[in-house]
Amino acid sequence: MDKIQHKKVDVGGLNLHVAELGSGPAVLLLHGFPEIWYSWRYQMIALAEAGFHAITPDFRGYGLSDQPSEPEKATYHDVVEDMAGLLDALSIQKQAFVVGKDFGAAIAYYFDLCHSHRVKGIVTLGIPLHKTM
């Protein structure tokens, strides 16, 4: 786990903490509530060993990421746009696999709805797909 690299990435005026490992096709791992990037640490290692670039951010206000100035006004859309901005900031030009767990699963679904051209595939865990999504 000492090979996992950590950095802060400016996304829309907020500094998001990001853990990364590996190279190859991008896999964006989205944590649940009340978790942080650390819940994906073992999957990051396995993905990197399989030839993927694991990207695991802490959402805004979570872990080591900045909290927005008015967190009560934050929406799912804000978090979705944070993820698009993160891929831009990391120069991820090709489509990414998006994996979401719990709260992160809802973000994964919304990310695909808003940015389907950036998604190669989606995996969700711990949440059913709701017809309202």
Image (cartoon, helix red, strand yellow):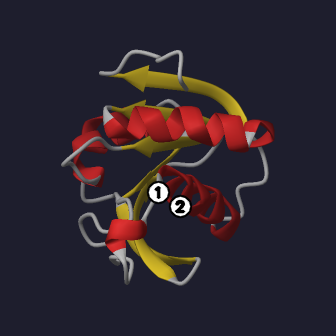
Q: Residue under circle 2?
A: 78
Q: What mark, if any, has residue 32 been given in the picture?
A: none
* Residue 96 seen in this snapshot: no
Q: Nearer the viewer, residue 84 or 46?
A: 84
- Residue 98 in percent (x, y) is at 55, 35
* Residue 92 seen in this snapshot: yes
Q: Nearer the viewer, residue 109 or 117?
A: 109
- Residue 116 in percent (x, y) is at 75, 36
Q: What mark, if any, has residue 75 been given in the picture?
A: 1
Instruction: Judge whether 89 appears above or below 15 on screen.
Output: above
The residue under the point 30% across, 21% down is 126
The residue under the point 64% across, 65% down is 85
Q: Quadrant of residue 103?
A: top left
Q: Are marks 2 and 1 in contact (CB under 8 Å)?
A: yes
Seen in the image, is 39 located left or right of residue 48?
left
Q: Residues within 10 Å of mark 2 (few under 14, many from 20)?
A: some
Seen in the image, is 106 located left or right of residue 72?
right
The residue under the point 58% across, 38% down is 110
What's the residue type where badge 1 is placed?
Thr
What's the residue type where badge 2 is placed?
Asp
Instruction: Judge whether 14 appears above or below 49 on screen.
Output: below
Q: Quadrant of the image for the C terminus?
A: top right
- Residue 62 in percent (x, y) is at 27, 63
